[in-house]
Amino acid sequence: MSSKTDVWQGTLALMVLRTLETMGPQHGYGLACRIELTSGDALQLNYGTLYPALLNLEQEGYVRPSWGSSENNRKAKFYELTKAGHRRVGKAAKEWKKTAAILARFFSYPEEA
Amino acid sequence: MRTLRALLLRILRGSRNGADFDAELQSHIEMHTDEGVRTGLTPEQARRAALIRLGGAEQTRQAYRERASVPWLETLRHDVKYALRGFGRNPVFTVTVVVTLALGIGATTAVFSVVDRILFRSLPYVHADRLVSVGLTAPLSPQEFMLGGSYYSWQDNQKPFEALTSFLGIDECDLTERNPMRLSCAPVEANFLPTLGVSPILGRNFTSDEDRPNAPKVALISYAFWSGHYGGDASVLNRQIDLDGSQARVVGVLPADFEMPTLGKADVLVPEALDVAAQRRADPGRVMWAFARLKSGVTIPQAIAQLQPVFNYSLSLAPPRFRNEVYFRVRSMRERQMQSATLAAWILLGTALAVLLIACANVAGLMLTRMATRERELAVRAALGASRGRLIRQSLSESLLLSLFGAGAGFALAFALLRAFMAIAPTSLPFLANARLDLRILAFTLAISIVSGLVFGLVPAFHSPRALALTARSQANGRAGFRQVMVVGQIAASVVLLAGAALLLRSFANLASQPLGLETKGVLAAHISLNRYRYTTPQAQMQFFLGAEAALHRLPGIVQLGFSDTVPPSGYHHDTIFSIISVAGRPPQTGATGGMVVWRWVTPGYFSALDIPILRGKPFTDDQRTGSESPLIISNLLAARLFPGQDPVGQRLQLAPNGPFYTIQAVAADVKNAGLDAAAEPEFYRLRRNLTDDWQNAPSAIFNLKTSLSPKAVAPWVQSQIAAIDPTVPVDIETLGESVGKLADRPRFETALLGFFAFSGLVMAVIGLYGVMGFRASRRTQEIGVRMALGARRADIVRLILSEGVRLILLGTLIGLVAALTLSRVLKSLLFSVGPRDPLSFFAVTAILAAAALLATLLPARRAALVDPSEALRAE
């Protein structure tokens, strides 16, 4: 068994949004590193999948891209949360907690019984 | 919402920002490589690791592109771009195809917009499919009618209808306000609108209390009258208006799309206000038009069966001599409205569709030829991995694109054609004047263009050989065989179209050149219709017309002047039944009606103005107009029926039982008096004397003026003479030639249209034939070279190619003639004194087609024969 988990379907977008909320504007590579770091290196992220996800968020109006320079002066495209993006994170966080709590009950139930 | 926005962005932006993403990817890889170098890897190792973590640069690009756009749309965009490039490389092909399609689609669209309302569009009533026209038919009237004497008994006892209603016909009426206006009024029963399922948009319908003889008068006004005369003002409700001199209260406004079931224009609906009890006792009672709504599930044949008892009651009331000639009829509202127009409409639509099919066949032929020259390109694409489906899709998107171009051009052409139709529009083809290119028509155009695109796109697509080998050379034989079948079909279709056009043309020529029995050249007819409210007595009416006659006599350039209440060859005239006329000294006639006899009131000048010869006896004289006798002139036909082998002059006739006797003074030549396409009916003329007895209910008359000056010059003088007497009297001036010409409008229209379609069909079929023959000849270049090298002369080569063409022409013509002979029977009711199998027409059609088709094969044959054998042998 692999010790690292693949990213679940649909959760990558949430991770991206949440990371952008806490870290502020980030470029793609920075986001990828940050997500792996946040997960405590438990996630195996295929960096290539990040860009279509970012594009999707951009098309949906949650993030706004702009070109800038990185820490070591490389040209890079930075992504920034829009207002809609902020609202989306807030909503998603609530939903996620609820879902997690429900699931948690399911998995704790047999042990209590 | 957000998903929709994303989809929209993908469709609009597509993968245009590919360069931007490349830069982003570049920067990602560089940053990752920097990181790797910092941890101690060599730059190459670091770069490799970065690419691995990315999952490959190209794969990432692909994933990004798929996210950035809608994949199938991308392929479509590609196909379209590819097709457009192909069209651009071959503009002659493209223009030919688009023009051919435009002709087919344009013609079909224009004709569809004309016949749509006649054949397909639903009538503006609720559940119009359940509405029927009901009534008796008798020699008196071609349309079914009802009589007050039995109508109410039908209403009480009928079973098949939910409701039965009536109206008394549309008549002129006058709005007698400050600005008097001539209107048309229709007296309708109180349940008229509810039966049709129509509600006023403003106000209400009449109540049955208002539909009584002495009830206060009320009126419903049409939308057009409301918006035109009252400016669409809602306060018109409850306003009193003066109709024919008495007050009526407006209680409602009809919807804009309201139509009378007979399609006549009615500005005002008023209650019938009939005394029902008196009508029940009356014999025969008021003539009325009746309409009914079938109970749900009842068919017309069932209704006819169920009505038999009430019909028998009506029959028992009819005078004995009528009984064998009275029937009853129930038919759908659409049939009642459209009459014979339905047949003409189907024929026109069928013709246009035939032209469209010929056009499609031509385009399919062109596509096949193009395909043959692109065989290698297709083979290369197949070898490079394009699937069969992908190639078919490419071919289909090309043909659909072409047919959309064709539809665009065709829609524009339809607009022009429709203008042309309207310019020669016959008034008897209903709704032509209102034909519009609306959304419904646009949808139809799109539908036929897509269908035709599929037809001529799929034919070549599925026809592509199974093995698209790179070495493919001349496998075109099977394909050419297919094209030959299409050419035979095209020729056959053109023969059918040409035959139809030739028959209509002959029929029209017969119609237009037949002797009318009267002179129309240089004759002006001035129709004058008095306002009933101003000229209420026979005395007043007579005085007006005699005054007008005297005034017109004083005009220069008028050679003869006579007036009558009606004029031939068509339009309204008085009718009487032949068998009620009796000759003095003979017992009254018995038996059947014997058909109808036409009669008119005339003055002595009538015969000389219209050049109707008096065959025997003396013409009416002006002195007789003030005399006390009642003279009569009868037509030759009537003379032959009443007095076979005898001299009618001096005989006396009683025109109605117990009526006065009239002396026959002369016999006049026969005149076409029942329309252009029907045989003349017997006729008599009564002299209108200057006595009020002869002017009972005579609000309208027609002055027939024979002029020595140009009729156009005289017309305004006539106007001003009448206006000098009473400026409010409407005068309608036409030359007799014009009004006779109008009667031929409908056949002229049908002939012109069918002729146009037949001609376009012929041109396209000939072009198609030329294309096939040219293609075949060029494919056989090598063979021709061999033959010539072996000693064949040029004439042999011409014969070789020609014989192939002639086979196609013969086969197509033969099939076409058989089909035309079968189909021409449909035209029978539209033809005038020419049979549907007229040998001359069919011979002419065959000759024209053969000549054109031979020309189309001769040209490629000659070209093939002029090939240089040494060149030909080297070809390919």
Image: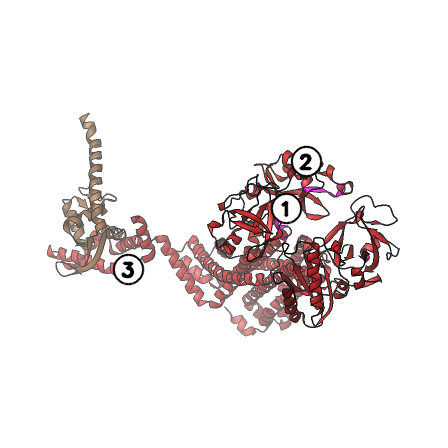
Chain colours: A brown, B red
Q: CA distance from mark 1 to mark 3?
A: 74 Å
Residue B728: percent from left, percent from top = 61, 61
Say which residue label 1 marks: B168
For marks 1 and 3, the one nearer the N-term is 3
Neighbours of disc 3 within 10 Å: few (<14), some (14-19), many (20+)? few
**Secondary structure under badge 2?**
helix
Query: Which span is picked out in magenta?
Result: B323-342
**Secondary structure under badge 1?**
loop
Using the image, name the chain to which the residue with label 3 belongs. B
> Could you say which disc has been placed on residue B532 in the image?
none
Q: Residue at x 64, y 34 (%)?
A: B157
Q: Which three-letter amino acid code belongs to the residue tagged 3? A: Asn
Asked whether residue B326 is drawn in magenta, I would say: yes
Asked whether residue B778 is drawn in magenta, I would say: no
Q: Which of the two discs, 2 and 1, sits closer to the camera?
A: 1
> Could you say which disc has been placed on residue B310 in the image?
2
Neighbours of disc 1 within 10 Å: few (<14), some (14-19), many (20+)? some
Q: Which of the two discs, 3 and 2, sits closer to the camera?
A: 2
Say which residue label 3 marks: B17
Left or right: where B227 falls relative to B502:
left
